[in-house]
Amino acid sequence: MVERRLVSGNYAAAYGALRARVQFVAAYPITPQTFIVEHISEFVNDGIMDAEFMRVESEHSAISATVSAEATGARSFTATASQGLALMHEILAIPAPLRLPIVMPVVNRTVAAPIGIWAEYNDVMPQRDLGWMMMFVEDNQEVFDMIIQGYRIAEDKRVLLPFMPNLDAFILSHTYEPVEFPDQEDIDDFLPPYKAEHAHLWPDDPMAIGVFTPPEYIQEFRYQTEQAMQAAKKVIKEVNDEFAKKFGRDYHGLIEEFMTDDAEAVLITLGTVTSTARKVVMDMRKEGKKVGLVKLRFLRPFPKDELRKIAEKVDAIGVYDKSISYSAGGPAFVEVRNALYGMEKPVIGYLAGLGGRDVRYSDVRLMFEKTLEAAKSGKAEKELVWIGTRGVQP
């Protein structure tokens, strides 16, 4: 039996932890994530979630406790945002090489300065080289589903890496949408109990984990983490296909294509702006303009091969970013341009929505129009385009 409810993105993430039968939760508040752990505290208090709920004194402590709990073999969970994620940075480098499959949703929010609480990806982009799988959701249903899928992917013996689903602050975290919650028995069938493979801090079977290691061995750790990240590509697709067959929702794996088969120009998007971009594509198609959309779901592992296949059939590519790597452009743009090296197709980076500024239909349409112009001329007028920025001509 499927339960359909009107819930926020934060509630969807919390309920995903409940239905995943998470055994340990470390909780520390930060806007706009706070309600995730607050909802879980209510589940535990009401007796509907059997988990150890630990209130800690900082986000650094939250991820430290989560790493420790996961190392005992417990399915573990925490959540954070913005400055809290930055405070976690030191510990975020630990779980991947130790092969600890934590799931931690991040509610993306701008980082100071100036201080802001609205959606921006500059909090998560500095974390992308620490060995976490990173993906961006479009709606609240995907929030819930990717908590469930996240544990299944992360705990696969071929992967054993931490998993970080990202959701836009307020646009998803505090906005209510209809979400389907499958029956617990069906979820249990899809996501069996976690059995630790490599790390288990048990008193009756002692093990040293994460000890001081000389250079003779650390490079091999890096190689093994890279191999696991590459293996995750196949596992993500397998888990997606099984989930789609069982629950009827197909997210297509690393990326999702929309009207790309005969497109002359495509726009690559992350997160909630994807929904607006779908509408723009449909409207422009009615006008006879051959545009398409690529929803970049996973930034890690990065879908290089999938993007190169798309680039082979289109004439120009635009990449939307809600963050900036100063002097280089948007991080997603940099990644895509690197992946397409040698293909000699115009690739244009669009910067919009930084600090949480609205990205409107007209903004997204402008991105498509400029990419289409580059497709027809064979070159981009500008490599980086700032959209909706006061005093800057796009």
Image: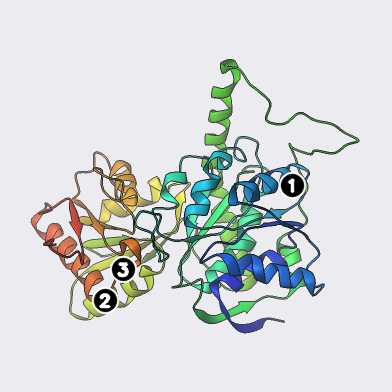
Q: Nearer the viewer, mark 3 or mark 2?
A: 3
Q: What's the residue type where badge 3 is placed?
A: Arg
Q: Position of residue 182 (x, y in %)?
A: 68, 75
Q: What's the residue type where badge 2 is placed?
A: Tyr
Q: What's the residue type where badge 1 is placed?
A: Ala
The answer to whether residue 244 of the structure is visible from this angle is no
Asked where in the image residue 210 lies, by quadrant, the reply is top right
Q: Quadrant of the N terminus?
A: bottom right
Mark number displayed over residue 193: none
Q: What residue is shown with label 1?
A: 69
- Compared across the picture, whether 213 is left or right of 365 comes to right
- Secondary element under disc 1, as helix, strand or loop, is helix
- Secondary element under disc 3, as helix, strand or loop, is loop
Q: Nearer the viewer, residue 39 or 270?
A: 39
Q: Position of residue 99 (x, y in %)?
A: 65, 39
Q: What residue is shown with label 3?
A: 357
Give the residue at x 52% y 81%.
177
| Mark 2 and mark 1 residues within 8 Å of each other at the beta carbon | no
Label 2 – label 1 distance at C-alpha: 45 Å
Asked where in the image residue 39 lies, by quadrant, the reply is bottom right
